[in-house]
Amino acid sequence: MSSLFQNAYYLAINFNAIFYGVELVIYSLSVNELLAHRKTSTRTDKFYIAFSTVLLVLITVYMSTEAVFGQEMWIVHQDSPGGPVQFFVDNADVWYQTMGTASSVVLNLLTDALLIYRMYVVWPSYRVIVFPCFLYLATIGLGIIELYASGKPGADFFVGTAAQLGVAYYTTTIALNALATTVICARLSRALAAASRSRGVRAGAHRQRYYVGTLPIVVESALPYSAAGVAFLVAYGLQSDRTVLFGAFYGMFACISPQLIVLRVVSGRSWTRESVSAAEFETLGLGAAARQTDAEVATTARSLDDGDRKSALGSVLEVG
């Protein structure tokens, strides 16, 4: 364990504390939105409260075990034979470190499940989620194997068989992250372009700002989570001493990114199946209306009976 690794570990603990404070704020806003601003709680509301609470508990376990291990290594056992380096080597498989790794694996599974669901929401086709579901099942199996390999006596998460299995596990789960993020970004970018072309036609400016823009896409696609995952995987595969620092970002965004999605959903600002379809439909409707001249409208209206004329003219006026 080099000096660079110890510095990275120290920074990781500090960033964990900072991001944990961010998570507490977002969690509080989400729960407040669900409890304080609604007269009755639906089953969906209760699910989001439970989901958010589980995320918070898991990330609490993860960051607490990292902090405790740092305290044991640098303060409690600093004068032990071999110092902090030997303590790390001898205790890398300690039970609470395994518990922290397990909490991060479960956290990843919950976040990935939410991303697959959001993929289906913005692109309602089972064909879109078949391959992501296959990857998800693979991450469950690899995650269990990785926990066993890194938690058995004498094992080390960063070297040996545990590290090799870890590369396989994180490659699979981060590939799922990247795929989900790409699909959601592509779908929402298309809807964003559609909404931008039709801005001011159907929705007021006060609703447009909740949907139109880069930030909503970044949040709803969990882009920070996927980007941190890719950075962590590269460092982990290269066995870099900075791996633990990138792992801290990846672990914390595995909690913060889904919590931001939940906050947007419960506050009614998230992209839904209906809003994506409506944005694309608006653009198609506007394009058709722009190509239809006044003379064509009049000719069409004269060819219809009274009831159909009212319906057709009402549709044209609504689009325009």
Image (cartoon, rainbow, N blue to C red):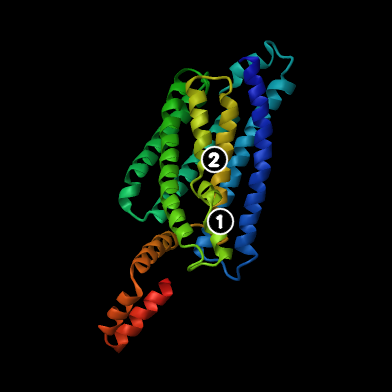
Residue 248: image location, x then y, percent: 59, 32
Please state the horizontal and vertical placement of residue 83, each as a whole percent of the image: 69, 14
Which residue is depicted at the point 48% across and 68% down?
Answer: 202
Residue identified by numbered label 1 = 264
Which amino acid, mark 2? Pro
**Helix, strand or loop at disc 1?**
helix
Q: Which residue is mark 2?
A: 224
Residue 51 in sight in this render: no
Residue located 66% across and 15% down the image: 3
Q: Amino acid at mark 1?
A: Arg
User: Do labels 2 and 1 touch, CB within 8 Å?
Assistant: no
Work out whether residue 253 or residue 134 is closer to the camera in this orientation and state it: 253
Q: Nearer the viewer, residue 191 or 226?
A: 191
Residue at 53% across, 34% down: 228
Picture coordinates of residue 318 (x, y %)? Answer: 42, 75
| Residue 243 appears in the picture as rendered | yes
Q: Is residue 296 above or below residue 244?
A: below
- Looking at the image, the residue that sits furthest to the top is 82
